[in-house]
Amino acid sequence: MDGQRPGLVVVGASLAGLRGAEALRDGGYDGALTVVGDEPHRPYDRPPLSKHVLAGELPAEATRLPQLTRLRARWRLGQPAVALDRERRELRLADGTTLPYEKLLIATGARARPWPGAGADLAGIFTIRTLEDARDLRSALALRPGRVLIVGAGLIGCEAASCCRDLGLTVTLVDPNPTPLARLLGTAIGGTLAARMRDSGVDLRPNTKVLAFSGDAGRVRRAHLAGGAEIATDLVVIALGATRDTGWLAAAGLVADPGGLTCDAACRVLTATGEPDPAIYAAGDVARWPNPLTGGRLVTVEHRGNAVDQARHAAANMLAPATGQIPYGHLPSFWSSQFGLNIKLAGLTAGADALAVVHGTRASRRFLAVYGRAGRTIAALSFDQARWLPAYAEAVAAGAAFPPILGATDRPRIETLAPGWPGPRRLEAHHA
Amino acid sequence: MRVVVDLNRCQGYAQCCYAAPEHFELRGHEILFYDPAPPEAKRAQIERAQQACPVRAIAIEAAGLAEGDEP
């Protein structure tokens, strides 16, 4: 290893940082490699936190990710990067030390959006993002709180509701939209999930907005709703999405805000003047880039698959010459298991003007549906029909006509419906 | 040992559940629940599960791999 040169630095020690660092080694890089992380842990897997860890089936520590290549890295864990000086090519860490880099991969991810209203300081209010978050919430759920209130019916809120019902707890799920997952999947599909949730005993309160919390002796006891009503509660889970961790870049002269860090198609960060910085790349939740597979729109994709794929892609570009920078095209996808259902999506539903169920039925809760926009297929959704999904994901990636497969013997006529998008949101968009 | 399954890839064929039934379990139609930290003594069984996966969704950390890093 070359002890003289600063080498490559990865800032962010979660999934994207780990897979990026591995890809640098797999790509033949043999020099110094440093991985900086604000959390004290080696990289761990977040998806189980809101599922099996909350359910008490896995200890939070069991989620440490396998390392797939020998990294020979220097780990600087529990040490947030607090500033970036691009002129001098160095990071400043929280302990005041500086860390020079030849090239830098930014994979600082996102953090849970905290409760923005009154009552945020009360005990008994939780978010789910980090290993500690999940461990703390699990401990609190194990004490069997009488009434759990979950605010936000996105993926994390729905998964938490599912876990709490599996534990036999009384659960109220509140969301300002007409159905769960309304912004992600539309109300037509969201309504199917709502029915499943109610069958499982969730007290689902759509079209409901929490304004504030209040408590007794410092513990949360009540949620105050728009319109004046209250919900009594003993434990609150705030599931309002995430904001990208870009605060430390405020003075770096980049295009960075809570919605992401803007990159070019090759994952190089853009400076405030619009030129890529050839020494700095970004990947994972934090990166906002013009994805060729979403029509070149600037997107952030806050899902696990993108953290892996983009980090590997960015790492390959970091090792490539300036003339060999390859654009990163990615078909966003996610899965979620909740209420006994396996929900998977490939593509982005944003702007869909049509929805068609092409296998199974919504009533059976086992189906595959496709989303269309202006006559093109833009996303495919599976409820417990995962084996059909890859074929439709290919159609989405290819920009096939909507619906992509016509005249099938098992579905001669395809009925098209409206996806059902809720009105404009008051908070900024948080989920890709 | 450390295991992770790419659940975007997983299609619920359940071959891992036959190869290592104590560490992989299928719930409902196609929800895979697996043990991400099985005992090292079960490595051979977990590797059989990895090889049995028709969509190659299972990744395993090689023995001793993460220890080679500087602190």
Image: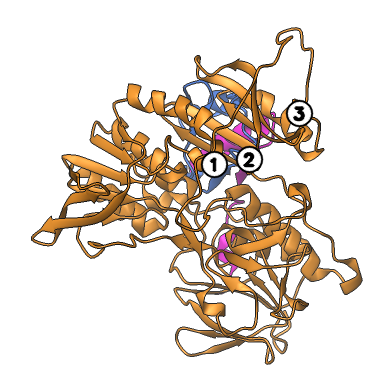
Residue A230 relative to residue A154: left or right: left
First-in-chain label (2 vs 1): 1
Which residue carries the number 2 mark? A349
Quarter of the picture containing the N terminus of chain A is: bottom right
Residue B66 x/y as whole percent: 57, 61
Residue type for callout 1: Leu
Whether callout 1 and callout 3 share a subunit is answered yes
Q: Colour of chain A?
A: orange
Helix, strand or loop at mark 3:
loop
Which residue carries the number 1 mark? A184
Give the extent of the magenta segment.
B41-70
Instruction: Give me the residue at 54% from left, 32% from top.
Output: A343
Q: Colour of chain B?
A: blue
Mark seen at residue A402: 3
Instruction: Give me the residue at 54% from left, 66% from top.
Output: A13
Residue A240 x/y as whole percent: 41, 53
